[in-house]
Image (tube, rainbow, N blue to C red):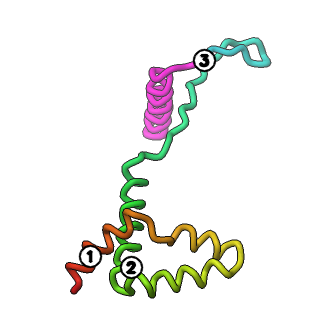
Amino acid sequence: MESALRSFERRQRAVTQKHRKLARGYVTRLNRNGVIEHKPLRKVKLPRLGGLLIALMCFLVFKGAMLASLGVAHYGEHVALLTDGSVADKLGAWVLGVDPVTLWIGMLLQGILA
């Protein structure tokens, strides 16, 4: 009797889960046997912009900290060395290049670190 109860509860959870999915939207289709079926819509989940924004800010703070610790001239020399390398090095030089935001963060951090 206990196995029958577990089997019933498993089927009931499956039906409830399918109903929840169908409540978010569905498409009615005719399968190859001629039976009408309701299929839940698949929603593509996009990554949240908050996490991406936090990662970008952390990267800019890292670049600013490197700029503050090395100095503008020395940091520029390191980036210039990357521009002479392979395609990956050139891409790294472009990403690590000094931009206005990095320069501003570097100046703020230089005042704190000094």
Dot 1 or dot 2: first in sequence order is 2
At mark 3, the secondary structure is strand
Labels 3, 1: front one: 1
Depth check: 50 or 1 in front? Answer: 50
Depth check: 4 or 38 in front? Answer: 38
Query: Which residue matches tag 3?
Result: 27
Query: Which residue matches tag 2?
Result: 67
Query: Which residue matches tag 1?
Result: 109
Depth check: 38 or 49 in front? Answer: 49
Magenta portion: prevailing SS class = helix
Dot 3 or dot 2: first in sequence order is 3
Q: Is residue 42 left or right of residue 17?
A: right
Residue shown at the point (31%, 69%) measured from the top left:
105
Residue shown at the point (60%, 17%) measured from the top left:
27
Residue shown at the point (45%, 38%) measured from the top left:
6
Residue shown at the point (36%, 58%) measured from the top left:
54
